[in-house]
């Protein structure tokens, strides 16, 4: 059965939805675990997972139960009031990380906005008003709002929206000398992804994150980790920076935080958190009972089951299988990754490979034009991985 390219739904979408996405010709109607189904009833193994969002798989029963129960109890009240699921998620996040306090919002870009704002406010409150510059990385991705695209080290993301927010400098990831040179007395923060996601699954060199931490400590700049893609178990640890043993002052989360409900968070130390007094920042929907009830279930599963060990084992299986394929087919140049955040760099454009996999019943995607990205639900099984590997072996062998 081939993928449907003509559908009344797709025709309607092309007429009525803003054209910000180049979509695959696929109307998805249902999901369960690592599988999704299209409108014609065809099943696909999903190695995209909503781009590292559905980490527990589609419609995880415990998360679904939490959402349904909360939807029938209390969906939204203002943040003028306390709500129990929000308090519990804040407690779980702080108990499991360096952070002391959490600000809740609705997306990754909003979490990074909060991080950028609090870093500036932190120094303003100390009387260092001209300390507002930030250093982030070439090939980084931090979002599409005006501040977060200004922090994003990719020209194509900023193009057309100039003038962008002032005060951002970019240095190559893994280049500690460049970072040292870029830091000035005006630098309020260094912002980076512990593994670059949209930039092509780029891992830090051994010791790099420790060296960044040292530079921040020496200069007094705050360190911000954007764990929006790497967090919530994606790399086989709850947060990717745990692999490196160095903590930031601020960490941003979204994507898998509520396994598919829109939710973001900015977590930080007590000292930093003081900069967000009442009136400094806010969000109507941030941390509603509904999304935090889902997130509470997500965090319970991530911290109290063996899912992270499973993710590590499945990641190793996928990476070693990909390396075997690389040994057979030179078109596969390099395999990079940690846990279940994996990239395979190929010679040439990845679109054809992605489409060929789709035809064979596998959802994968491609970043930076030639890096195939695999970010399946962490519950992916050995059979799913072996099936994908034999599909790729055939497709790349052509
Ligand atoms: N930061 C990182 C590392 C991301 O991967 C993304 C999204 O891909 C974002 C920020 C932006 O998140 P959102 O699309 O929820 O605004």
Image (spheres, rainbow, N blue to C red):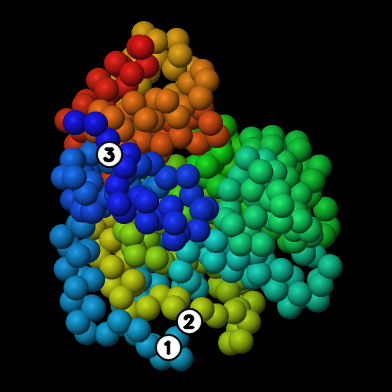
Q: Is mark 2 on a helix, strand or loop?
A: loop
If you read the primary sequence from the N terminus, does the residue marked by circle 3 or circle 1 appear first? Answer: 3
Looking at the rendered image, the disc whose residue lies closer to the viewer, 3 or 2, is: 3
The residue lying toward the viewer, choosing from 8 and 285, is 8
In this rendering, would 312 be left or right of 379? right
Instruction: Report crowding for label 1: few under 14, some 14 to 19, many 20 or more residues within 10 A (C-alpha).
Output: some
Q: What element carries label 1?
A: loop
Disc 1 beta carbon < 8 A from ligand 1? no
- The disc at residue 284 is 2
If you read the primary sequence from the N terminus, does the residue marked by circle 2 or circle 1 appear first? Answer: 1
Snapshot quadrant of residue 185: bottom right
Say which residue label 3 marks: 4
Say which residue label 1 marks: 78
Give the CA distance from mark 2 to mark 1: 7 Å
The residue lying toward the viewer, choosing from 192 and 93, is 192
Residue 275 visible, this orientation: yes
Judge whether 5 appears above or below 300 on screen. Answer: above
């Amino acid at each position: 059965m081939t993928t449907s390219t003509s559908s009344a739904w797709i025709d309607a979408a092309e007429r009525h939805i803003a054209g910000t996405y180049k979509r695959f010709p696929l109307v998805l109607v249902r999901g369960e675990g690592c599988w999704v189904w299209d409108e014609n009833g065809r099943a696909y193994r999903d190695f995209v997972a909503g781009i590292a969002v559905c980490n527990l798989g589609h419609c995880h029963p415990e998360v679904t139960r939490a959402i349904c129960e909360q939807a029938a109890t209390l969906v939204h009240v203002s943040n003028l009031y306390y709500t129990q699921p929000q308090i519990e998620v804040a407690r779980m996040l702080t108990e499991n990380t360096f952070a002391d306090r959490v600000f809740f919002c609705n997306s990754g870009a909003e979490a990074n906005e909060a991080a950028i704002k609090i870093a500036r406010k932190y120094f303003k409150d100390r009387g260092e008003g001209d300390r507002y510059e930030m250093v982030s990385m070439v090939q980084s991705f931090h979002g599409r709002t005006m501040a977060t695209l200004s922090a994003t080290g990719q020209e194509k993301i900023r193009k057309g929206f100039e003038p962008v927010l002032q005060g951002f400098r970019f240095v190559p990831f893994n280049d500690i000398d460049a970072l040292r040179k870029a830091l000035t007395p005006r630098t309020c923060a260094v912002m980076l992804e512990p593994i670059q996601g949209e930039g092509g699954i780029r891992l830090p060199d051994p010791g790099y994150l420790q060296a960044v931490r040292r530079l921040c400590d020496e200069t007094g700049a705050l360190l911000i980790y954007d764990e929006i893609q790497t967090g919530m178990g994606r790399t086989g640890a709850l947060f990717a920076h745990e692999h490196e043993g160095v903590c930031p002052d601020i960490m941003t989360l979204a994507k898998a935080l509520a396994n598919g409900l829109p939710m973001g968070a900015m977590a930080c130390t007590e000292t930093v958190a003081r900069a967000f007094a009442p009136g400094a920042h806010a969000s109507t929907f941030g941390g509603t009972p509904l999304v935090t009830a889902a997130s509470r279930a997500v965090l319970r599963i991530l911290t109290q089951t063996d899912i992270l060990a499973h993710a590590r084992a499945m990641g190793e299986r996928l990476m070693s299988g990909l390396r075997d394929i690389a040994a057979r087919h030179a078109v596969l140049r390099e395999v990079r990754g940690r846990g279940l955040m994996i990239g395979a760099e190929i010679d040439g454009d990845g679109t054809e490979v992605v489409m060929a996999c789709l035809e064979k019943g596998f959802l994968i995607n491609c970043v930076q034009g030639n890096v195939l990205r695999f970010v399946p639900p962490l519950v992916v099984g050995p059979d799913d991985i072996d099936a994908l590997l034999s599909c790729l072996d055939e497709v790349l062998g052509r």
